[in-house]
Image: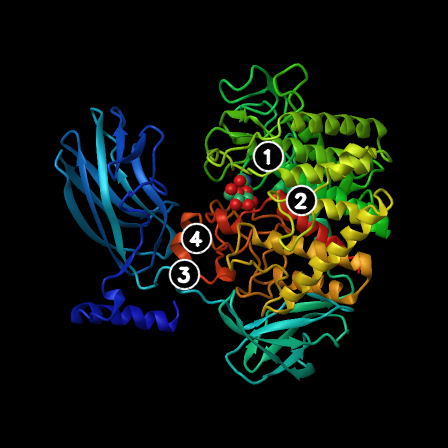
């Protein structure tokens, strides 16, 4: 506990005695979310045998008879923050359809369990208000408030309302410190590239910085330029520029007064390992194949997931959701999307496309490393095919399996996704997932993304495996025809239980992107005419793929009419200029700046994809400004940001290590590993959609809405489309 907090804690009883009206802490801070059940149950849950729902603004649950222990039938809320030594007051109103005694509990859930309070509650049919006080012996972000009804001899219904837990001295969203105000790329700077740091300082005049080597000797000094207020982080920022230093070395530090940055390297090739680690992320997350210790080491090795072996219910013969089709498909293989075990065609196609694009860039720029068989620790690393293509093929094979078979309704369309019926608990190794899995109905967006990736596959694999290329081409053209015949089948936003929705109701962009790839593969006029979108400052994402048409055209100047190529190149440069301006206009070097000031879910991928566009501009123009901006974007991802946080696990002193993932769950079970090195966290997200973010980040500045906690799926998940962007940029950064 910091001195300041110790003082606050010591003074708290005085404040309570005096009843200070001005001290918000005298009343304590609310620690549960949604205690009034105004319209939704979330984030409250109940045991599987205790179905519950919101009824007239209360949470009511059907308690079964026949259990023995209190905890065998529960209603609860997790991730409630508790502070050691602080008193908490639990209040609620409850009733039951029989006269029963339940228990009200505040405790931690991991052993050894620390109990703040555990009280009997006598319930009748008349709602009654209860109040209990207890003191927490531990500090945790993962306390639990629960109502335990197990042991009932007869079934009954319990209803709860106005649940409140008040206490603690750290305000919600407060108590954050971000370490040194001197913010650097904590991994390392390219010796021949730009080297800048951001310094949080309220000074309105430049301040002196010093660069020290790992002996502590000052290498050089200079003074900052005052950038000023940075609206996205809320910080007042200076910039220190030490680009002139080219001497390689490890553990340099940058200091301003007594403040010292995290250590960093200056290296000739700082990104060679990251380009491989970020690609090996995909092998780690493969479905349908054992992940072998000889490639990943013993702590990451695991059995194959979802190959029809119990307790798995998939993925070798997966039915549709009831009533939606009369067949099953073998959809084994592919990559798990993210922290969940879902597999989604929209996103999978984008990620596979980005890896194939990375390969193609390597081919065109003669980056032999990117073409190397043996680059990665994967089973196919001796098959004389570039490893990055092997990895992409693992996903493309899965995408092809998601197509509706000939002779069936909607033949040629792609099923939108396959995933568990309900969300599985954490931790959960893929092979242990017991949930039934279903194909969800086809969508136009999935069909077109499949068409795009399969067309690109057809072009690229001609060189390596013509038979596979032919299969890809047939799948792509069939998908295109099917999408044209069914141009408006949209995946619903509500379909988000057990898997994400990847919903999208505008597929103009998907048509256009697929058309660009199909034209490159076939040269059929029909496709050329169907390219209707352009790259714009909003770039591209899984939902907005229109800009990718221009990237494909710019990548393949010999395959498109000259007029289209010139226009696409012009737009790439123009959009890249906008990103460079946004990067330079911010206190921390983020080329992505949201027009509405709100950071999005997966914002680090928006940064990485903006860097992809600037990198493409560099490839087209060879202007150093683009190259430097890409490198500075890496600085942002690797720690030069408002949080002093590297979002890439294993890279930097303060790197994300608790990303939301079903089995990289060390935070929940020390026997399991942290995310593998090179895994990109989603990053700051103003939406705060998960309870951990809601508890700990309210009021955050957009660029600071991030918490490295496994429970924060809306700020700290990993995902294939985010790592594909990271892999692309890392490979680029390794070749310039
Ligand atoms: O990356 C997706 C983000 O753009 C959406 O806002 C969010 C909510 O729909 O879903 C994200 O994707 C998640 C997917 O739905 C399920 N697997 C995990 C993905 C990353 O969080």
Q: Is mark 2 within 8 Å of ligand 1?
A: no
Which picture quadrant has residue 237? bottom right
Picture coordinates of residue 629, whole percent (x, y) = 70, 64
Ligand 1 occupies quarter: top right
Between disc 3 and disc 2, the foreground one is 2
Q: Secondary structure at mark 2?
A: loop
Q: Is mark 1 within 8 Å of ligand 1?
A: yes
Q: CA distance from mark 3 to mark 2?
A: 34 Å
| Residue at x-position 56% and y-position 55% | 656
Work out how far the residue at label 4 is from the one at label 1, CA to CA, in angstroms: 25 Å
* Spatial separation of the CA atoms under disc 4 and disc 3: 11 Å
Q: What residue would you read off at disc 4?
A: 693
Which residue does the numbered mark 2 point to in the structure image? 546
* Camera-nearest label, 2 or 4: 2
Q: Disc 1 designates what residue?
A: 344
- The mark lying in front, picked from 4 and 3, is 3
As measured in the structure, the alpha-carbon distance from the residue carrying label 1 to the one carrying label 3 is: 33 Å
Distance of label 1 from label 2 (alpha carbons): 19 Å
Using the image, tell me which numbered label, if any, was put on residue 261. none
Question: Between 585 and 690, which is closer to the camera in this rendering?
Answer: 585
């Amino acid at each position: 506990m910091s001195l300041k907090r110790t003082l606050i804690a010591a003074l708290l009883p005085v404040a309570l005695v005096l009843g200070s009206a001005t001290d918000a802490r005298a009343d304590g801070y609310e620690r549960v979310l949604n205690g009034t059940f105004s319209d939704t149950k979330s984030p409250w849950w109940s045991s599987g045998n205790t179905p519950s729902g919101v009824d007239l603004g209360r949470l009511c649950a059907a308690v079964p008879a026949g259990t023995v222990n209190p905890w065998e039938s529960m209603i609860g809320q997790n991730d409630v923050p508790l502070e050691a030594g602080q008193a908490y007051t639990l209040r609620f109103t409850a009733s039951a359809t029989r006269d029963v005694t339940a228990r009200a509990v505040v405790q931690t859930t991991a052993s050894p369990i620390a109990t703040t309070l555990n009280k009997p509650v006598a319930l009748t049919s008349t709602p009654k208000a209860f109040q209990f006080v207890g003191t927490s012996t531990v500090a945790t972000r993962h306390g639990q408030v629960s109502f335990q009804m197990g042991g009932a001899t007869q079934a009954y219904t319990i209803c709860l309302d106005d649940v409140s837990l008040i206490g603690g001295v750290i305000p919600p969203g407060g108590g954050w410190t971000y370490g040194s105000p001197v913010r650097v790329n904590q991994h390392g700077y390219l010796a021949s590239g730009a080297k800048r740091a951001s310094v949080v300082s309220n000074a309105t005049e430049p301040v002196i910085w010093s660069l020290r080597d790992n002996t502590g000797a000052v290498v050089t000094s200079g003074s900052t330029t005052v950038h000023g207020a940075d609206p996205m982080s809320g910080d007042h920022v200076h910039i220190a520029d030490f680009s002139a230093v080219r001497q390689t070395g490890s553990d340099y530090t940058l200091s301003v007064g007594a403040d010292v940055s995290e250590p960093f390297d200056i290296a000739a090739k700082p990104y060679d390992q990251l380009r491989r680690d970020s690609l090996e992320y995909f092998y780690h997350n493969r479905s349908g194949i054992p992940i072998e210790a000889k490639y990943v080491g013993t702590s990451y090795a695991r059995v194959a997931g979802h190959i029809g072996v119990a307790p798995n219910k998939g993925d070798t013969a997966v039915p549709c959701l009831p009533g939606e089709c009369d067949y099953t498909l073998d959809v084994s293989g592919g990559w798990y999307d993210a922290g969940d075990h879902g597999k989604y065609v929209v996103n999978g196609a984008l990620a596979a496309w980005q890896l194939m694009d990375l390969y193609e860039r390597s081919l065109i720029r003669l980056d032999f490393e990117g073409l190397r068989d043996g680059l990665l620790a994967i089973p196919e690393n001796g098959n004389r095919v570039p490893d990055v293509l092997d990895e992409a093929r693992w996903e493309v094979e899965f995408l092809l399996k998601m197509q509706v078979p000939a002779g069936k309704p909607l033949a040629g369309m792609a099923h939108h996704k396959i995933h568990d019926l309900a969300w599985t608990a954490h931790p959960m190794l893929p092979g242990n997932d017991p949930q039934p899995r279903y194909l969800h109905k086809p969508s136009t967006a999935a069909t077109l993304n499949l068409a795009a990736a399969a067309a690109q596959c057809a072009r690229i694999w001609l060189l390596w495996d013509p038979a596979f290329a032919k299969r890809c081409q047939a799948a792509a053209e069939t998908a295109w025809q099917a999408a044209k015949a069914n141009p408006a089948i949209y995946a619903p936003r509500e379909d988000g239980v057990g898997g994400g929705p990847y919903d999208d109701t505008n597929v103009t962009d998907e048509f256009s992107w697929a058309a660009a790839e199909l034209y490159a593969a076939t040269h059929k006029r029909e496709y050329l005419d169907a390219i209707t979108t352009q790259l714009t400052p909003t770039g591209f994402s899984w939902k907005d793929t229109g800009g990718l048409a221009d990237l494909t055209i710019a990548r393949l100047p010999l395959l498109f009419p000259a007029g289209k190529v010139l226009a696409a190149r012009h737009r790439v440069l123009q959009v890249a200029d906008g990103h460079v301006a946004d990067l330079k206009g911010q206190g921390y070097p983020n080329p992505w700046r949201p027009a509405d000031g709100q950071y999005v879910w997966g914002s680090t991928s928006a940064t990485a994809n903006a860097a992809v566009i600037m990198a493409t501009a560099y490839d087209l123009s060879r202007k150093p400004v683009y190259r430097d901006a890409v490198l500075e974007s890496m600085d942002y991802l690797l720690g030069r940001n408002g949080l002093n946080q590297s979002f890439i696990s294993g890279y930097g002193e303060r790197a994300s290590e608790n990303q939301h993932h079903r089995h990289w769950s060390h935070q929940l079970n020390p026997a399991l590993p942290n995310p593998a090195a090179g895994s990109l966290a989603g990053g700051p997200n103003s939406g705060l959609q998960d309870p951990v973010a809601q508890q700990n980040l309210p009021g955050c500045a957009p660029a600071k809405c991030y918490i490295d906690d496994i429970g924060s799926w809306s700020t700290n998940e990993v995902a294939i489309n985010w790592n594909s962007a990271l892999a692309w940029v890392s490979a680029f950064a390794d070749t310039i």
